[in-house]
Image (cartoon, rainbow, N blue to C red):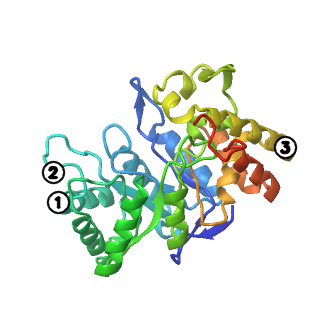
């Protein structure tokens, strides 16, 4: 993989980021990725040029398991070769009334635990996992700025939030001379049922990087799903064991008329390029022109990871890219299904 600048920062990261939310995660009591498999995946990612790894303090069961897996893996490698990102916000300790959110207390408690589990002195990137309506953003930003000043965090990032919230946070950083958010992590993919142009306009104007999670729409854009009823965009035939067959959020988050229109075009472009739909969907994100876009990819197996990383070798024409973009809208410029 090639490397690209992370927004307006001086740090360079691989074209794709490896997401580790499955590490230590249990679904229906079944462990999705144990530590041995996690290390095999991390080895494969690093061997193929990957240096950007994403985790969070609440990934895994119990909380922190993903960070521990990565920390044990990093212990055998040169820490400075990797760009490690983690997050804070969600409840870590249900017995603690200050065990969640973005207060100074919770952030201070969680950064120490995260650094300890990752067995590192610093994070390259620290995200707020969500917006905290109960804590003034000034308190959150002042606390994060102090972590940067202390050398515990290099850069700050913001995951899913409204465009006005991102704008407010950036303004507060500017007027108070705090370190600002340099990276965003929204839900964004070619077939997304929501329009996020307003949010992405802020990102582009402020030269922030975008590291979208779920870039393949929970597997929908891999092309393994088929439409069961042409009159019902929510109807889907899913392979046994795939997310569409066991995740109730799949229908709500990923199935829409727009999604099926985009998937048809993604499949067509994939056939033209002798690539897979997953690779084309990822390349569409990687080729965004208004901002640096580094999709976060997950994988259960090395073969699946290799397929995703193959997006780095796909070369899409501007015309092919625009066809996928145009499939998001009908002839009147409205998104499909609305």
Q: Secondary structure at mark 2?
A: loop
Which residue is situated farthest in the front direction here? Answer: 332
Q: Secondary structure at mark 1?
A: helix
Identify which residue is drawn at 47% across, 60% down. Answer: 184
Identify which residue is drawn at 66% across, 44% down. Answer: 328
Task: Looking at the picture, tell me which residue is in the foreground, 310 or 24.
Answer: 310
Asked if marks 1 and 2 touch (Cβ < 8 Å), the reply is yes
Q: Position of residue 213 (x, y in %)?
A: 51, 49
Q: Is residue 83 above or below residue 269?
A: below
Label 1, residues with CA under 10 Å away: few <14, some 14-19, many ≥20? some
Q: Position of residue 150 (x, y in %)?
A: 28, 77
Distance between the alpha carbons at the discs numbered 1 and 3: 52 Å
Give the labeled residue for mark 1: 105
Give the labeled residue for mark 3: 274
Identify which residue is drawn at 55% across, 35% down. Answer: 254
The N terminus: image quadrant? bottom right
Give the labeled residue for mark 2: 98
Identify which residue is drawn at 60% across, 34% down. Answer: 337
The C terminus: image quadrant? top right
Label 3, residues with CA under 10 Å away: few <14, some 14-19, many ≥20? few
Task: Looking at the picture, tell me which residue is in the foreground, 215 or 68.
Answer: 215
Mark 1 or mark 2: whose residue is earlier in sequence: 2
Q: Position of residue 290 (x, y in %)?
A: 63, 66
Label 2, residues with CA under 10 Å away: few <14, some 14-19, many ≥20? some
Task: Looking at the picture, tell me which residue is in the foreground, 57 or 238.
Answer: 238
Q: Looking at the rendered structure, which numbered label has been put on residue 268?
A: none
Asked if marks 3 and 2 touch (Cβ < 8 Å), the reply is no
Q: Is residue 231 above or below residue 221?
A: above
Task: Looking at the picture, tell me which residue is in the foreground, 3 or 164.
Answer: 164
């Amino acid at each position: 993989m090639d490397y690209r600048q992370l927004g307006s920062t001086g740090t360079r990261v691989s074209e794709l980021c490896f997401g580790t939310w499955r590490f230590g995660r249990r679904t229906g009591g079944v462990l999705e990725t144990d530590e041995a498999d996690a290390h095999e995946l991390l080895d494969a990612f690093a061997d193929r040029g990957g240096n950007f790894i994403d985790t969070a303090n609440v990934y895994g069961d119990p909380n922190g398991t993903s960070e521990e897996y990565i920390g044990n893996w990093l212990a055998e490698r040169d820490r400075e070769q990797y760009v490690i990102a983690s997050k804070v916000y969600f409840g870590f300790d249900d017995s603690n009334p200050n065990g969640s959110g973005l207060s100074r207390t919770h952030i201070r408690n969680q950064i120490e635990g995260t650094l300890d589990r990752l067995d590192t002195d610093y994070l390259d990137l620290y995200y707020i996992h969500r917006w905290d309506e109960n804590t003034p953003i000034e308190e959150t930003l002042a606390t994060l700025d102090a972590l940067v000043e202390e050398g515990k965090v290099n850069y700050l990032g913001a995951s899913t939030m409204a465009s006005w919230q991102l704008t407010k946070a950036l303004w507060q950083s500017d007027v108070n001379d705090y370190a600002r958010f340099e990276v965003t992590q929204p839900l964004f993919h070619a077939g997304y049922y929501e329009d996020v142009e307003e949010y992405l306009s802020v990102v582009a104007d402020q030269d922030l990087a975008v590291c979208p999670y779920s870039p393949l729409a929970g597997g929908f854009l891999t092309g393994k799903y088929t439409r069961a009823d042409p009159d019902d965009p929510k109807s889907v035939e899913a392979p046994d064991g795939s997310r569409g067959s066991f995740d109730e959020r799949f229908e709500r988050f990923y199935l829409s008329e727009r999604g099926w229109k985009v998937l048809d075009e993604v499949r067509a472009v994939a056939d033209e390029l002798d690539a897979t739909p997953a690779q084309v969907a990822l390349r569409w994100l990687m080729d965004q022109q208004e901002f640096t876009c580094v999709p976060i990819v997950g994988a259960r197996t090395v073969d699946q990871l290799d397929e995703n990383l193959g997006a780095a070798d796909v070369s899409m024409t501007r015309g092919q890219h625009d066809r996928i973009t145009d499939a998001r809208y009908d002839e009147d410029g409205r998104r499909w299904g609305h």
